[in-house]
């Protein structure tokens, strides 16, 4: 089988497609024919050695997949060959076949296509966990989403709307903001051309936002924090802009604002029942048409390296997927 291989941490253009033997599942694992693998910002960081988790080399990137079970380990009771599944695999997804832990796999819900299945879990679970469990977003509150046209950004807009919030989408181009409106944003803000703090204040009649969902960091975090209302919450989700902001703490005291970390991958280990409840909620919203991953581009396995490069280069709208067996 063919797979994208990272042999040394470094530039994305050193990733290469190689022929490898089919992997064998362990006792509690599944061997999966990968139908779709979503590309996440963390894939670009991990191959460059810039992510908090550093896999043992060589490895295949690709953290979440959908596909068809080919074989199962001796202790697996819940899955059989032929089952259509979604799995968070951490790595190994950009390949024709991959290994998934049975405990981190779930049936592909009826009515969900492989691309949506692959693109759903990481982004949407992060946003639901962030907005509900960490941000305590309430109906009628104002939510500002930074990097709103990206993978987690689009999911935060849709979930924010589903929770009854008024959503202000902030992104770097009018083109990206048009997509944000299409998926439900009430207002938009172009932070390349507009002053972030002033525009949020203008759109909230001077009150400020109740929750900011920040997957970008860099120069945007401090002005967004300054534009939070009394007891507003800043959700620290990621640092796609590269810089990790250093914040004057008096900004929290003045309006009893909170700065709240969001780390879905760890949170689901600490609260598996809460994670399961969130997944069920997402499946219900998907079935009702309330949420729908926006898959803007599809790449064959031969071009998986280009897919990773395009997310690193800020070119992606919504989600992109690799289709290794097409
Ligand atoms: N905490 C968690 O549990 C968790 C879970 C998933 C993801 N994340 C993090 O969330 C962030 C977003 O992930 P994603 O998969 O949604 O990525 P994405 O689709 O690439 O979206 C990131 C957005 O950040 C903005 N951005 C600003 N400066 C950028 C730069 N220099 N390079 C690239 N993008 C830049 C871009 O929007 P504009 O061009 O409009 O500015 C882009 O749309 C990442 O840092 C990721 O690691 C965290």
Image: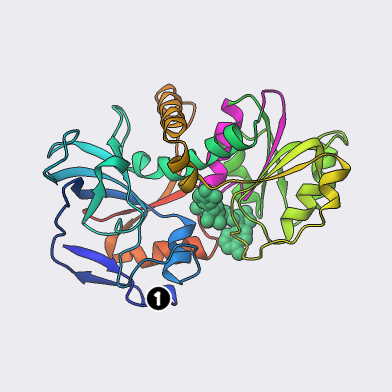
The x, y position of residue 226, in whole percent, is: 82, 48
* In magenta stretch: residue 134: no
Q: Residue sitting at 61 percent across and 65 percent down?
A: 242
Would you place residue 276 above or below residue 301 in this image?
above
The quarter of the image holding the N terminus is bottom left
- Return the x and y of residue 201 as percentages of the image width and height: 84, 41
Image point (77%, 48%), residue name? 225
From the viewer's perspective, tell me whether residue 142 is left or right of residue 324: right
Image coords of residue 221 (percent x, y)? 73, 54
The quarter holding residue 200 reads top right
Question: Badge 1, how many Cα within 10 Å: few under 14, some, many 20+?
Answer: few
Question: Which residue is at 54% across, 40% downward?
Answer: 127
| Foreground of the two, 34 or 59 | 59
Q: Quadrant of ligand 1?
A: bottom right
Examine the rendering and report whether any part of residue 42 can be seen.
Answer: yes
Q: Is residue 153 magenta?
A: yes
> Within the image, what quadrant is residue 209 found in?
top right
Label 1 sits on a secondary structure element that is helix
Which residue is under mark 1?
13
From the top left corner, tell me how far across and down residue 319 is, in percent.
45, 48
Q: Which residues are magenta?
A: 138-162
To which quarter of the image does residue 68 belong? top left
In the image, is residue 21 above or below residue 115? below
């Amino acid at each position: 089988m063919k797979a994208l291989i990272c042999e040394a941490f470094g530039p994305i253009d050193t990733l290469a497609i190689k022929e490898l033997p089919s992997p064998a599942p362990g006792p509690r694992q599944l061997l999966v024919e990968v139908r779709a693998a979503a590309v996440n910002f963390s894939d670009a960081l991990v191959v460059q050695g810039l992510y908090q988790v550093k896999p043992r080399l060589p490895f295949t990137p690709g953290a979440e997949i959908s596909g068809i079970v080919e074989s199962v380990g001796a202790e697996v009771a819940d899955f059989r060959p032929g089952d259509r599944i979604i799995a968070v695999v951490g790595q190994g997804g950009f390949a024709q076949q991959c290994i998934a832990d049975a405990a981190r796999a779930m049936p592909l819900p009826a009515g969900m296509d492989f691309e949506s299945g692959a693109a759903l879990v990481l982004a949407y679970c992060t946003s639901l966990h962030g907005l509900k469990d960490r941000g305590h977003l309430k109906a009628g509150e104002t939510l500002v989403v930074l990097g709103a046209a990206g993978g987690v950004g689009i999911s935060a807009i849709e979930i924010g709307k589903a929770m009854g919030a008024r959503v202000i989408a902030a992104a770097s181009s009018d083109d990206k903001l048009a997509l944000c409106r299409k998926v439900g944003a009430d207002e938009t803000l172009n932070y390349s051309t507009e002053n972030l703090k002033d525009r949020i204040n203008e759109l909230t009649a001077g009150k400020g936002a109740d929750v900011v969902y920040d997957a970008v960091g860099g120069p945007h975090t401090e002005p967004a924090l300054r534009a939070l209302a009394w007891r507003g919450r800043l959700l620290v989700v990621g640092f796609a802009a590269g810089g990790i902001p250093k914040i004057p703490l008096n900004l929290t005291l003045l309006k009893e604002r909170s700065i709240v970390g969001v780390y879905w991958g760890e949170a689901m280990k600490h609260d598996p029942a809460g994670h399961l409840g969130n997944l069920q909620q997402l499946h219900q919203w998907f079935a009702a048409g309330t949420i729908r991953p926006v898959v803007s581009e599809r790449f064959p396995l031969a071009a998986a390296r280009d897919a990773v490069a395009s997310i690193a280069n800020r070119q992606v709208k919504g989600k992109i997927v690799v289709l290794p067996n097409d």
